[in-house]
Image: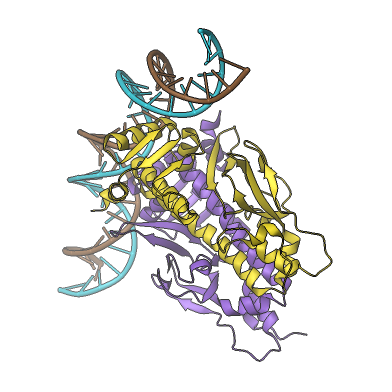
Chain colours: A yellow, B purple, C cyan, D brown
Amino acid sequence: MLRVPTRCSICGLREACLTCDLMLANTGRNEEPIVNDLHVAQGGYLYRTGDQFTALYTVRSGFYKTVQTLEAGREQVTGFHMAGDLLGADGIGSEVHGCDAIALEDSHVCAIPYSHVMKHGRYKRELQARLQRAMSGEIVRKHGVMLLLGTRRTEERLAAFLLNLSERFAARGYSPTEFILRMTRREIASYLGMNDATVSRHFSKFRSEGLIDVQNKHVHILDVAGLRRCLSSKTD
Amino acid sequence: MLRVPTRCSICGLREACLTCDLMLANTGRNEEPIVNDLHVAQGGYLYRTGDQFTALYTVRSGFYKTVQTLEAGREQVTGFHMAGDLLGADGIGSEVHGCDAIALEDSHVCAIPYSHVMKHGRYKRELQARLQRAMSGEIVRKHGVMLLLGTRRTEERLAAFLLNLSERFAARGYSPTEFILRMTRREIASYLGMNDATVSRHFSKFRSEGLIDVQNKHVHILDVAGLRRCLSSKTD
DNA sequence: CGCGGGTTTGAGTCCCTTCAATCGTCGTGG
DNA sequence: CCACGACGATTGAAGGGACTCAAACCCGCG
C-alpha cells in the first residue's frame, strides 16, 4: 500500500485535484517533496502579477479572487475560486503570472511545483490528462463568463452569478440556497463588468420580488426557478 | 534524418504548432497516421457544439470564428482564429465540443487526434509542454477579452480589437496597418459585446478622426498611436 | 460612542441600444 | 450590360439601461 500524506488521503476534494496524483507519483522516489498545505491569510497574495511561475495551486479551503490590474490602477476581478479549483495555470505559457491571486478569507492551498508536473507527466498519463482537463475546464468557464458579459444585461448577469455560486456550493456539499458572500459588492461588480451601485440595486430588486433574501454578505435564495426565469427572460 | 511530411517541413507557422511535434514523434512508428491538412470551405463547420471531441486543430491558413449558441438562437462569437492558432481545446475536459468552429474563408487546418497527444505525450516532454503552453495562452487571452468586456466602453473595445488584429497580422508577416476583415460587423459586435450599429458608428468616428481608413471589409490603420491613446483615454 | 468602510438609494446624465430607413455592394439572371 | 434582389453597412431618431455623483445608512470595531 502506498504511503500517501495524510492530507491527501483525508481530502474530500473532487477528482480535479492534481496534488493527490502527484503525491502518489512521487511516492518511493527520492526527490524534493511537494510543497503542499500552504497557508494564506485573508487579504494575502498567493502570487502577484509578474511573479515567476513555478507552481500550480489547488484551493483546499477558503476563497480566492484573481485580479488583473490595468495601467492606471483600474483593476478587474477575473475569477472567484473555491475548494478544489485550480489556480495559476495562466502562468504556464509565459512563465510569469498574469494576475494577482488574493485570499478573500484565511485559506489553505496545495502548491504543486510545475517541474514535478512535467517530470511525472511523462510516467503518469492520468496525471497529464487531469491537468489538461482542468485547463480545458478553465477555458470553458471563461467562455461562459464572456458569454455573460457579452450578451446579458446586468440583472441577468447577477442572477447567473448567484446561480453559479449556488451550484458550486452544492457540488462541494454546502447549501445551495444559503451561503455567505466572501467578496464585496465592488468585487462582484468588477467581475460582472458593472457598477457596484448596480449590484446593490439588483439585489434589492431581487429581494423585493421575493427571489432572494439578502442582507450584507448573507444570501438566501428563495426561488431558484425564479432566478432562472430571470436569466432567460429576454430569450423569448 | 527524420522523414517529416512535406507540409510540416515547409510550414511557416510559429512554434506553437503541435502538429509538427507530433509528426516527429510519430516518425518510425507503425501507427495510424495523423490526419492533417483538412480542408474546410467558407461557411463550413470544423466542429459543432455537442460533437464528440476527438482531435485538436491548428489553423494552417484561413480565418475561423468560434460561436456559442444560447437557448433561443441568440449566439455569441467567442473568438477569432487565424494561422497558427489552436482550436478545439475546450473539448478536452468534457470530451464534447462546447462551441461551433466555423470557417470565415476557405481554410486548411491540421487535425491532431487527441489519442496521439496522450500517447506521445508520455515520451515527448516537449510536446506536452507545448500543448500546456498553448492552453495556458488561451486562458490568458480570454482573460484579456474579459477585461475588455468588463472595463472598457464600446469605443475602447473596438480600438483594442483593431490593435489586436494588427499585432496578430504583424506576427504572421502580414501588414499590421492594412488588412481585410474576414468577419461581418455583426460578428465583431457579438465578439465585443455590443450592437452592430455601434460598431459601424465607431468605425465612422475613427475615420472622421483620421485614425483609420475603412470601407467595408478593408481596413487601413493610419494612426496606431492615436488608437492606443483612445484605449487609455479613460485611464487618466 | 464615534469612526471608517462597505452598502443602499436617489437624481441626473449619457452611452448604447433599438427600431427603422437608406445606401452600398455583390452575385444573379434577364 | 443593366436590372434586380439580397444582404450587409451606415446613419438617424428616440428611448432606456447603466453609470456617475453624492448623500444617507448600516455594521463591525477600536
Q: Is residue A70 left or right of residue A117?
A: left
Vertical arrangement, residue B20 with respect to residue B231, above or below: below
How many numbered dots are placed on residues in this image?
Answer: 0
Image coords of residue D30 (percent x, y): 63, 17
Image coords of residue A63 (percent x, y): 56, 44
- Residue at x 75%, y 54% (from the top left corner): A35
Q: What is the quadrant of the N terminus of chain A in the image?
A: bottom right
**Residue B105 in which image quadrant:** bottom left
Residue B4 visible in the current orientation? yes
**Residue C9 in which image quadrant:** top left
Image coords of residue B39 (percent x, y): 48, 78
Towards the viewer: D19 or C20: D19
Vertical arrangement, residue B188 with respect to residue B222, above or below: below
Image coords of residue B207 (percent x, y): 44, 42
Vertical arrangement, residue A224 with respect to residue A190, above or below: below
Vertical arrangement, residue A114 with respect to residue B59, above or below: above
| Identity of the residue furthest to the bottom in this view | B30
| Identity of the residue furthest to the right in this view | A30
Q: Is residue A122 left or right of residue B227?
A: right
Towards the viewer: B208 or A233: A233
Residue A49 visible in the current orientation? no
Towards the viewer: C22 or A42: A42
Q: Is residue A142 left or right of residue B26?
A: left
Towards the viewer: B216 or B4: B4
- Residue at x 27%, y 53% (from the top left corner): A235
- Residue at x 54%, y 77% (from the top left corner): B111
